[in-house]
Image (cartoon, rainbow, N blue to C red):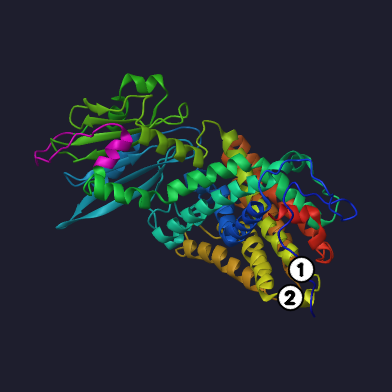
Amino acid sequence: MDTPERTDAPPAPDESTASTGVRPATRSKKKLVGPRAFKLFWDAHSVTGIVIGLGLFVIFFAGAFALYRGELHAWADPGLRTNGTQLSADAITQPLLGDAPPAQGTDVQVTFPLRDRTYYFVRYETPEGDSTRSVQAYVNASTGETFEPTVENHVGRSALSEILYDLHFFGQAGIWGEIVSGLISVFFLFAVVSGIVIHLRKLPKDWHTFRPRSKLRTTLADAHNVLGLVGLPFAAMYAITGAFLALLVILLAPTVLVVFDGDRSKVDALVAGIDLPSHELTGERAEMLPFETYASAVPDSWDAHGIETTTIIVHGWEDEAGVVVVYGATDNMLTAAPRAALDASTGDILAASNVPTASPLGGTAVAITNLHYARLGTPVAKVLFFFLALTTSAVILTGNVLWVLVRRPKDPRATPWLHWVLARLTVGIGCGLVAAVPLLFLVTAVLPLDLPSLQLWEHVALFGSWLAFTIAAFFGASAVGAARWQLALAGVLSLLVPVASGFNGAAPWVSVANGWWGLLTIDLGFVLMGMALVWTAMRLTPDALDSVGMADDPAARHAVA
């Protein structure tokens, strides 16, 4: 059946239409941009958004949980929960180093509990025959219980936290996934800028226009505009910081090769703001000092600015020429990246960064990292970033939905196959991931931690169910019906997560009693998200998104840009 032609792009912002549909003969307002430029911005913003939309949704939705990476370790593995006390680094390391002494001349690393970390991390090489064996251990900061990772870079016995963290930048695909996520962030920044140009004249109206009792398509359009405006600074910040962090390898590679002749240590020194002293091992055995001594043998300015030790690395263990590098961090300064190099035998300071002064490159890199991971000195900032990340996810998904609806012909029988596929993909990838994440939490809580294949089942729970939901979205009478049952299922599963916390030894009242505020925040977040998803599913009736008349809905046509 033939459908009447219609123009996808709306009129320029100064071209209004009266209630009768007739354009006024004169215009009193000066154009922000010309009609041609406005249409180019509209098309570029729309196409950019739809191309990167689903990938960007995954980045932000998984990124919301990645903010609680440390807390998720403790949620998934009770062995990593603390009781409010903290053992010293020496009390933690002495049993490990006594059972398997480090090889002389090798590096020994100790990472301290800080911010959301509830554990020490110890790594070094120990002699084994004619070679060495790598030793890695995560140690509970309160109990001293040790966990050797069953999979490299996976803290504790569960992979839940690392799965979501890696998904945030497509880390499952290795370096190529990081590059793709960085490029998506660059395009996202362009989409943000072009969206501002398009909506600039209507920003005051969009800020307070929200009609939750109207038709669902109008509510979606209003939500897209309002939430997009609320999260605009957040989205712009994450587009910039995400692109920087994900593409850092590409950005630094030419610098290392051309400027520093392939010497990465020189770049590291430039970032740190100090030149770490070079050292050649002598082979002469020397006694090492306690780690707490190294942690305290730092410049007095560190204490004055609240610098805490994050990591100690001994380069050249038990060697006369050994050097210790102490890394610090503070919540009081956004750009601080303090480091100090000490003599391993005496503890004397060989070089140290001048806190609070940081090198321009180092200060910028640290500030970008702290902003990206909400390391702003207060848990409130992390909670705010969490909800803003979910808000941005909703903006992205509603943008995809509105794009499909606005461009869909009025006669459903004439819907182009591309719109049909995009609608089903939006449901499967978007709603499917929202349902797969709480399912992952439930599987982690139910399966025993000592199950050898636990991490395999966790991967299957997330990616297997996500794939199943995506395939299921292509079947059924409509995409709306698939979205409704997937959102309803996601809501129910989310509401069950706090119940599963009880089976996992972290019921909300237990978290309050032990001061596990991060675990409590996770449970409360799932409760709020579950209620919002169930409410949305109840409103998502087949006639709520009826395409008839959609092309003439000003709110929807305005929002889809």
Image point (53%, 66%), residue name: 460
Residue 242 in percent (x, y) is at 49, 47
Image point (75%, 46%), residue name: 14
Q: Which residues are magenta?
A: 266-287
Looking at the picture, which amino acid does disc 2 mark?
Gly
Residue farthest toward the bottom in the current orientation of the protein: 1
Residue 307 in percent (x, y) is at 40, 26
Residue 556 in percent (x, y) is at 76, 55
Q: Is residue 124 visible?
A: no
Q: Which mark is residue 481?
A: 1
Alpha carbon of mark 1 to alpha carbon of mark 2: how far?
7 Å
Residue 465 in percent (x, y) is at 60, 67
Other-residue count near label 1 (Cα within 10 Å), few / some / many at <14 / 14–19 / ≥20: some
Image point (74%, 62%), residue name: 406
The answer to whether the residues at label 1 and label 2 have Cβ atoms under 8 Å apart is yes
For the N terminus, which image quadrant? bottom right
Q: Is residue 213 magenta?
A: no
Relative to 433, 248 lies left or right: left
Relative to 547, 360 lies left or right: left
Image point (68%, 52%), residue name: 35
Other-residue count near label 2 (Cα within 10 Å), few / some / many at <14 / 14–19 / ≥20: few
For disc 2, the marked residue is 476
For the C terminus, which image quadrant? bottom right
Q: Is residue 279 magenta?
A: yes
Query: Which of the two residues, 128 or 485, is positioned nearer the viewer here?
Result: 485
Looking at the picture, which amino acid does disc 1 mark?
Gly
